[in-house]
Image: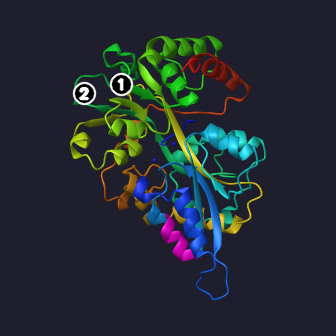
Amino acid sequence: MTNTSKLKTTIKAAILTTAVLTTAAALLGGCSKNPGETTKKLYIYNWTYYTPDSVIKKFENEYNVNIVYDEFASNEDMYAKIKAGGSGYDIVFPSGDYVSIMTSQNMFEKIDKTKLTNLNNIDPLVLQKATYDPDMEYSVPYYWGAAGIAVNTARVPEFEKDWTIFSRRDIQRRMTMLDDMREVMGDALVTLGYSVNSVNPAEIDKARDLINTNWKPNLVKFDAEAFGKGYANGDFWVVQGYAEVVYEEISDNQELVNNTVFFIPQKGGPAYIDSMCILKGSKNIDLAHEFINFIHRPEIYAEFCDTFRFPATVNTPARALLTKTPLYNVEDLANTELKNDIGASLELYNAAWFDSIRVGE
């Protein structure tokens, strides 16, 4: 899910939380299909609300493995944890810009494509967009999507489907935006007519000023973790975030579901391709390849998308197998722009975000 901070988003009953998985692993650790054989473990570090429990269980059963699944809310958090060396994970799911960063820092194993029979299911358009690794040397695309805006129409009956909704003083302190530097800065840059990957200091300064002057005064906070819950309980009426997070949190409130509109602004904004990467030093490289290949079986990918009501943006044959109407369409991504690794220019964003926008929050 970006961001950068992305949504990024099972569903509580459909996601295995770390505690549940760890307990399950402990309980099952000695059990296997063959007496005397120790059940293998695969360690996954993924976005919150992003891999269905049903998919995890199918893989565990087929490959006689226990998956230990930890979650992160932003690329920055994920990167900092892995960079610090405290992981032991086998597979991680960074967005494209962080695939570039982490590849350049030799943090991934090379993908052995001879072990991946399902790569031909990946939409060539996605690989064209994945300029950070178009030949899948270090990453295999998992999902192409974008954050958008959810609005409670019972509270906000009239609005423009645009990022400028965050400028509205009449709904001050009832809105949140993601705690994600590249997402929020990208929204501001697009609003001003610039690229989400601008490295022009003057443009970045203008984006900073737009956020500080027009948006931030109206926000409760920048939030990449609890925006769905806050929206569900009525604290927030307008949230920037990921559709799957919002709709999962409100799933037991049909009235709110009926009153919720989710949209990706037509002007566009930052998009993401989250990819599956095998971390350097993984102790389960073969099993990690099996998991990546498993995800791209069309029926498994369709199950993943149906769980979150995603369009099947990456896996082409899975589109014909979807059984649920997606929360948005592939066409809604037309004007979005992937966040690129902007190298040393990232410091311009850091200065704007951490030294100004986030000060005094």
The answer to whether residue 57 is left or right of residue 346 is left
**Residue 317 is at least partly visible in this image:** no
- Residue 155 marker: 2
Q: Which residue is mark 1?
A: 174
| Residue 61 is a magenta residue | yes
How far apart marks 2 and 1 lie (CA) works out to 10 Å
Question: Who's the residue at 54% across and 16% down the image?
Answer: 207
Which segment did they paint magenta?
56-64
| Residue 223 is a magenta residue | no
Return the disc, 2 or 1, that comes first in the chain's sequence: 2
Q: Amino acid at mark 2?
A: Arg
The outermost residue toward the bottom is 35
Residue 48 is situated, as x and y percent measured from the top left of the image, at 51, 48
Q: Amino acid at mark 1?
A: Arg
Q: Is there CB contact under 8 Å for labels 2 and 1? A: yes
Q: For residue 94, which quarter of the picture?
A: top right
Question: Who's the residue at 42% across and 59% down the image?
Answer: 14
Viewer-proximal residue among 225 and 64: 225
The answer to whether residue 308 is left or right of residue 283 is left
Dot 2: element: loop
- Residue 274 marker: none
**Residue 203 is at least partly visible in this image:** yes
Disc 2 crowd, CA 10 A, few/some/many (<14, 14-19, 20+) = some
Say if 290 sits above or below 88 in the image: below
Question: Who's the residue at 40% across and 40% down the image?
Answer: 228
